[in-house]
Image (spheres, rainbow, N blue to C red):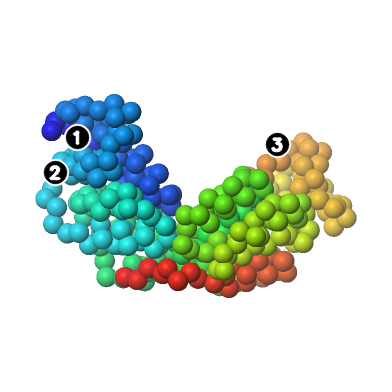
Amino acid sequence: MKIKPLTKEQIIISTDRLTRFKETETKYLRVFKDIILNNLIEPKFKKSELDEMDYEEIKNYAEKIINLSVNEKFEDALINQRLFEYENSIFKLDDNTQKLLKNKINYKSIIKLLPDNIPKNLKFLKSLGGENPLAQREKERFCFPVEKIVLCEGITEETLLPEFAKLCDFDFNQNGIYIVSAGGKNQVVKYFYNYAECLKIPIFVLLDKDAKDNFNEIIHKLREFDKIHLLKSGEFEDLLPDSLIIKTLNYETKNISAAPIEGLNESLSKVEFLENFFKHRGLHEFKKAEFALAVKENINSPDDISDEILEIIKEIKGTKKSLHKMEF
């Protein structure tokens, strides 16, 4: 076998992709096939040939390329075994996918290549070589191993729910709560149907008030440990206390506009109010993502959390855990 060794950067990127929260079969096949297509010189395979190849053979080629690129002797399978157990604890995996997971990639040597500033999933990978990864998650707050999914419509919820949870002494990262922004109510349904088919862990679904049809599409598919919450009014921005919005706007416009903020408490839609506020003050276009980040910086008091947000956090915290809990 003749290869073009992966660079250090390519090794890190491939390892990152293998350890993200993604369906096991999809991520492993994508990474392994890319490595074979780009770094295996002899024998040479076409993509169509890889698509027909047995998973065991794909795994063997990719594993050899990675380990030859690392160029250190494989000595310890602890991380590989723990990754195998972890993926099986959260995903329903068939026999073919098990073949991809039963590899001897030299993770112990790869960890030595990782820089200090790495994403949460790679921090988790490093923890798998230690005595108690769950204790390390609690201490370092890197979210993995994931134990529960929060599935929401947009970036505002994704940005702010973890911050509000901290006010309730419940840290998402510390407790393995992984939040997914689907990008709209219809996408939430698609994500949920897919997750409910492939996941063993609980899913908490959060929908805006106008998503009643989507709510009905999901509720009959809920498993015993899943939960869904339909907002009582409007969208997530409507749950933000007026005082928090005013505090954020004052902070954001302190060097631009000193005019008082009027009409917020009378507005039926806070997003509509904010769009008009930004437009009439001659500011940049209102963007939910940017405003959510600004709100995040101004959350610092129990007064910043509304009753319904508090209710949502309690529901997320109280969602039952599945029977498939990972043990280290």
On screen, residue 83 versus residue 76, left or right, reads right
Mark nearer the N terminus (1 vs 2): 1
Q: Quadrant of the N terminus?
A: top left
Residue 243, how many percent across, how many down?
76, 61
Q: Quadrant of the C terminus?
A: bottom left
On screen, residue 66 versus residue 136, left or right, reads left
**Residue occupied by mark 3:** 284
Task: Give the label, 3 or 1, closer to the camera.
Answer: 1
Residue 25, how many percent across, how many down?
38, 47
Q: Please give the name of the residue rendered at 21% of the width and 31% of the height, measured from the top-left corner.
A: 40
**Residue occupied by mark 1:** 5
Q: Circles 1 and 2: CB distance less than 8 Å? A: yes
Give the residue type that dot 1 points to.
Pro
Res 199 label: none
| Numbered marks: total | 3
Give the residue type that dot 2 points to.
Asn
On screen, residue 327 versus residue 80, left or right, reads right
Instruction: Look at the image and tell me whether residue 36 can be seen.
Output: yes
**Position above or below: 285 against 172:** above
Q: Nearer the viewer, residue 26 or 82?
A: 26
**Position above or below: 60 against 231:** above
Q: Nearer the viewer, residue 213 or 117?
A: 213
Q: Please give the name of the residue rendered at 26% of the width and 34% of the height, measured from the top-left corner.
A: 36
Q: Quadrant of residue 169?
A: bottom right
**Quick one: label 2, few (<14), some, or many (20+) residues within 10 Å?**
few
**Residue occupied by mark 2:** 71
Mark nearer the N terminus (2 vs 3): 2
**Quick one: label 1, few (<14), some, or many (20+) residues within 10 Å?**
some
Q: Secondary structure at mark 2?
A: loop
